[in-house]
Image: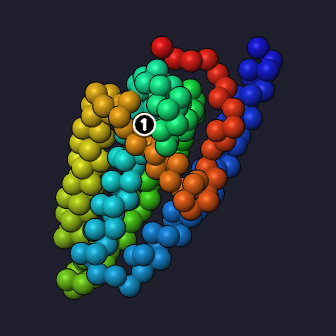
Amino acid sequence: MKHSFHKSLKWSTGIAVITLVLAAIFSVASTLLLSGVSWGMGMVIVLIIVLIGVFFDIIGVASTAANEVPFHAMASEKVPGARHAILITRNADRVANFCNDVIGDISGIISGTASAAVIVELTMNLGRGEGTVFEHTVSILFTGIIASITVGGKAFGKSYAIHHATAIIFQVGRLIYFFEEKLKIKLIDTSSNRGKRRN
């Protein structure tokens, strides 16, 4: 129990630090991207941020629903990405936490902030000052659209992830393999497969 608590505390602390760093990076990146661009391009950037959140949400859900067994057969045949897929399914709780909570929440916060910047740019570009009825109307409409895309996208993504979980995680494993083998960017340790095999 003590070991489990210590391990959970260590993971929680680590993920909190990672969230802080990623949130800062996302915030700075979105600010730089939105700086000096038109409101139309700003909307595209906001949409991309939302889609990033949906994409990672799909991975998070798929990691908890994927079947590990097929990956062992692939790994025995040395199929690229199979070992990575095994580790993802064995650490589904952490993968889901990172993808759904960290990236998902950060994307939601940043998209909200970016939306506000786009709305201000739009109203100023049309010659309407801040605090006007027009700005409030645009703000409500744009916020509603972004919220509907986010919620609708995640609803579709969750359904898709549950029904195609194993295939999705295999593709994620292949992507990680590509980064590690071709680009020499180490993302996860596949030297040992820890944990119990999931049936």
Circle 1 SS class: helix
Nearest to the observer: residue 143 or residue 25: 25
Residue type at tag 1: Ile
Q: Measured from the top left, where is residue 57 in percent x and y?
A: 40, 41
Q: Can residue 116 be seen in this view?
A: no
Q: Is residue 57 above or below residue 72?
A: below
Nearest to the observer: residue 199 or residue 36: 199
Q: Residue at x 76, y 14 (%)?
A: 1
Which quadrant holds residue 43? bottom left
Q: Measured from the top left, where is residue 37 in percent x and y?
A: 34, 82
Q: Local crowd at mark 1 within 10 Å, few (<14), some, or many (≥20)? A: many
Q: Measured from the top left, where is residue 134 in percent x and y?
A: 19, 70
Position of 95 with respect to 67 (left or right) is right
Q: Residue furthest right?
A: 2
Q: Which residue is drawn at 79% across and 20% down?
A: 3
Nearest to the observer: residue 106 or residue 75: 75
Position of 2 with respect to 188 (left or right) is right
Residue topped by disc 1: 169
Which quadrant holds residue 166? top left
Q: Measured from the top left, where is residue 45 in percent x and y?
A: 34, 67
